[in-house]
Amino acid sequence: MRAPARIAIAVAALVALSGCSGGSDEPTARPTTSSPTTAPAPPAAPPRHACYELSFAEAAEPTSSAQAVPCTTAHTAVTIHVGTIGPVLDGHLLAVDSDTVQQQVAARCRAQLAAYVGGDEETRRLARLTVVWFTPSLAESDRGAMWFRCDLIALAGPDRLAPLPRKTRGLLAADGALDRYGTCGTASPAAAHFQRVICSARHSWRARATIPLPKGTRYLAKAAGAAADSTCHDIEARLASDVLKLKWSFEWPTRAQWDAGQRYGYCWTPDPA
């Protein structure tokens, strides 16, 4: 039972008792005192521009209790924005963990990421930088917390984060940013042992470009795939030192990415450097 409800029941019980008690027709006046009650303050919003040393698993959680660390020390996440949740839709108050609220927060954090890291759309698509978001717990939101937090992270591999530098604003606007934060692979994406890694890690292939798929394309359609593969071949031909030894691979988006609206794939070529 919530505290306000318990208080209301207690007050009602006191009123009922006062109406049926007393041994005389004339009640005896007694001085009364009252002590005002104040609701506890809602939990404070997290600090802006704070740094955290999160694990991959912690970054995937909807809430976070991690303590900030100095940005001059090792860290894997940086808060790039703190905003306010709008929990009311069509006159209804939504829970902080509802799909509608989470989608609202996701959209706002993704917009903040583009503005924060800089670079053009192609650079951001090829980078291993992404954003995760945290909201208050249900208990904290019941106490009035309505903030959300957007954190920048870099994906080092399938299940680990890469360390971030002290300064991260405009990270993808710098020359050679993709040599450090780009998307690379331990092998061709067609290989069974392929793993996607950050380009600062050991690798043998690199995602060189994104290739858009025509509007109306069916998922894994052969004609669209062949056209994208041909475009990827041309990209490798421009980069390769020996046109007689070309290697390339076009990678479709995953089914989940396709269902979420992604209509481009990746062109991969060897990157022995």
Image: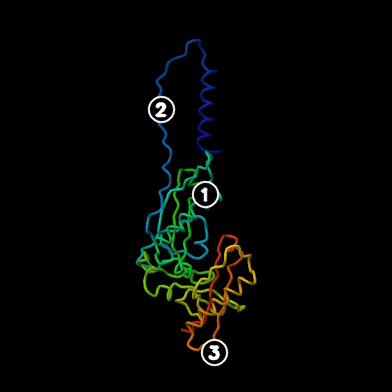
Q: How is the image coloured?
A: rainbow
Q: Position of residue 141 (x, y in %)?
A: 48, 46
Judging by the rendered image, the residue that carries numbered circle 1 is 101
Which is closer to the viewer, label 3 or label 2?
3
Q: Residue 8: where, in percent of width, then height?
A: 51, 30
Percent of width and height locating residue 176? 39, 75
Residue kind at label 3, given as amino acid type: Leu
Q: Does dot 1 land on a helix, a strand or a loop?
A: helix
Q: Is residue 232 left or right of residue 39?
A: right
Q: Residue at x 57, y 63 (%)?
A: 215
Q: In which image quadrant can residue 53 be found?
A: bottom left
Q: Amino acid at mark 2?
A: Ser
Residue 229 sits above or below residue 257 on the image = below
Label 3 sits on residue: 244
Q: Nearer the viewer, mark 3 or mark 1?
A: 3
| Residue 34 disc label | 2
Nearest the eye: 219 or 17: 219
Looking at the rendered image, the disc whose residue lies closer to the viewer, 2 or 1, is 1
| Type of amino acid at the residue the image marks with label 1 | Val
User: Which structural element holds mark 3?
Assistant: helix
State if disc 1 and disc 2 touch (CB < 8 Å): no
